[in-house]
Image (spheres, rainbow, N blue to C red):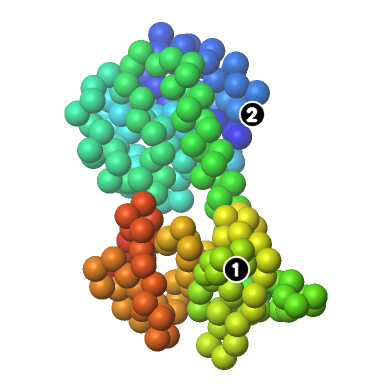
């Protein structure tokens, strides 16, 4: 990942640079001391991750996030914890918040988060609109748009469409690892659903077709974030 450091304090800047240089998958290609320099640099270079100090002279790091669109992933660095709530209002790009003095483990953790988020975005951009499932000794193509849900049935997994169903000798965990589509989501240890097929949600269940499907406590928050209700 290409990385930019935006830090006005020289000691903090040198410390960040040294830690970043110890991480194999990270390349620091720019160092800036204020927001103006950072904006100019971002306009001319491809950056994946910014280590951004909040308390910068003039325009702050928070101001940069508020005002500039299409930003790379951001890790805020600051000496004060009270900025955390404001920082995570922008959690679509802000992936971590490190209080100074920074340490190698915290930097490494932030880089791992960035790598994970970037890899998930890349996968989401390259999904197929169909699945091939092996059922009754043949490969059957199932269109995602037709699929309602996938459920565990003893030692099998059932793929249910509006008009048919296919039994596959597998586990739901194995299927979940192979699935690559933003509309499909595991909401229970026994169910993966097509989010576009949800009719309504009530209490701890969703209605798809005529099927009431439970939502586990562990998956409820993730589902709510994915649906992003008004």
Residue found at the very far front of the displayed protein: 154
Residue found at the very far right of the displayed protein: 137
What quarter of the picture does the C terminus occupy? bottom left
Residue depicted at x 46% and y 30%: 110
Work out whether residue 1 or residue 193 is closer to the camera in this orientation and state it. 193
The location of residue 10, given as percent across then percent down, is 41, 11
Specify the quadrant of the image occupied by residue 147: bottom right
What quarter of the picture does the N terminus occupy? top right
Q: Which residue is mark 1?
A: 157
Is 215 left, or right, of 140 in this rendering?
A: left
Is 149 left, or right, of 130 in this rendering?
A: left
Give the SS element for disc 2. loop
The location of residue 101, given as percent across then percent down, is 35, 13
Work out whether residue 43 or residue 91 is closer to the camera in this orientation and state it. 91
Whether residue 147 is visible to the viewer of this picture, yes or no, is yes
Whether residue 145 is visible to the viewer of this picture, yes or no, is no
Label 1: how many Cα within 10 Å (few below 14, some 14–19, many 20+): many
Residue depicted at x 27% and y 19%: 79
Is 213 left, or right, of 117 in this rendering?
A: left
Q: Which residue is mark 2?
A: 25
Q: How many marks?
A: 2
Mark nearest the camera among 1 and 2 is: 1
Label 2: how many Cα within 10 Å (few below 14, some 14–19, many 20+): few
Up/down of 109 relative to 225, above or below: above
Give the SS element for disc 1. strand
Up/down of 72 relative to 50, above or below: below
The location of residue 203, given as percent across then percent down, is 24, 68
Up/down of 19 relative to 67, above or below: above
């Amino acid at each position: 990942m290409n990385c930019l450091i935006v830090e006005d304090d020289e000691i903090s800047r040198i410390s960040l640079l040294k830690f970043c240089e110890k991480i194999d998958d990270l390349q620091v290609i720019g160092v800036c001391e204020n927001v103006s320099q950072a904006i100019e640099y971002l306009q001319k270079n491809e950056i994946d991750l910014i280590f951004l100090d909040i308390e910068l002279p003039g325009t702050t790091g928070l101001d940069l996030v508020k005002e500039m669109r299409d930003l790379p992933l951001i890790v805020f660095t600051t000496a004060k914890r009270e900025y955390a709530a404001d920082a995570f209002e922008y959690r679509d790009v802000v992936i971590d918040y490190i209080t100074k003095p920074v340490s190698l483990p915290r930097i490494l953790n932030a880089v791992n988060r960035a790598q994970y988020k970037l890899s998930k975005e890349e996968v989401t951009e390259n999904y197929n609109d169909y699945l091939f499932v092996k059922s009754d000794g043949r490969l059957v193509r199932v269109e995602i748009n037709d699929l309602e849900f996938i459920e565990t049935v003893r030692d099998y997994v059932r793929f249910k469409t509006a008009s048919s169903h296919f039994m596959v000798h597998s586990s739901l965990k194995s299927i979940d690892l192979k699935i690559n589509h933003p509309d499909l989501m595991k909401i229970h240890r026994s169910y993966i659903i097509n989010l576009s097929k949800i009719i309504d949600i009530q209490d701890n269940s969703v209605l798809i077709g005529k099927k009431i499907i439970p939502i586990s406590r562990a998956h409820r928050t993730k589902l709510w974030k994915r649906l992003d209700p008004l």
